[in-house]
Amino acid sequence: MLNLLFFAESPISKKEAANFVECSINTLNADIETLNTTIPDDIAHVDEIDRKLTLRAATRINFDYLTAFMISTSHLFQLALSEDFIVFCDELNPKEHWAQHDFIISDFPLPEVTDVDVLVWHMPPTKRDLADLDMIVRAKYGTIE
């Protein structure tokens, strides 16, 4: 949505924005509220006038800065920096883990791979991996409802 609004030459209807990001109007409204509470007004703000959306961004703000700000303030980024996540990564053994799922060949000599490398390459996690990560997130941030 940030991309759509940042580069739009004119206001975008809420329906068009919802279709673009493939969500409902209710989800779009929630996302707008999250953006507006996360990003300080002097950086950027999503405005709605007559069911049309615009992104009001400070002149010194470019899209890369805005994207970096959103990533660096996200819960997942903060979790990745936390000691809990480092402990979680140390407990996994990615080479054997991915070899079990035919993502890598277990007989092929690979350099040491860290779990962060695995996450960066977007390899699909198992249900157990997701359950472990969910447990860490709930312990750190509580239940998300």
Image (cartoon, rainbow, N blue to C red):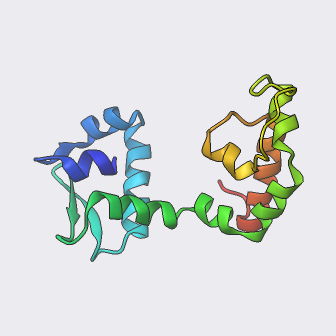
The image shows residue 128, relative to residue 101, as above or below, that is below
Q: Is residue 51 visible?
A: no
- The picture places residue 45, in percent across and down from the top left corner, at 28, 65
Residue under the image location 25 percent in, 35 percent down: 16
The image shows residue 9, relative to residue 63, as above or below, that is above
Which residue is farthest top?
102
Apparent side of residue 134 relative to residue 79 in the rendered image (left or right): right
The image shows residue 104, relative to residue 50, as above or below, that is above
Apparent side of residue 79 relative to residue 58 in the rendered image (left or right): right
Residue under the image location 80 percent in, 25 percent down: 105
Residue under the image location 76 percent in, 61 percent down: 85
The image shows residue 81, relative to residue 55, as above or below, that is below
- The picture places residue 117, in percent across and down from the top left corner, at 68, 48
Apparent side of residue 142 relative to residue 145 in the rendered image (left or right): right
Q: Is residue 40 visible?
A: yes
Q: Report the number of discs.
A: 0
Q: Quadrant of residue 34?
A: bottom left
- The picture places residue 29, in percent across and down from the top left corner, at 38, 51
- Of residues 132 and 11, the one drawn nearer to the viewer in this rendering: 132
- Of residues 44 and 67, the one drawn nearer to the viewer in this rendering: 67
Which residue is farthest left?
10
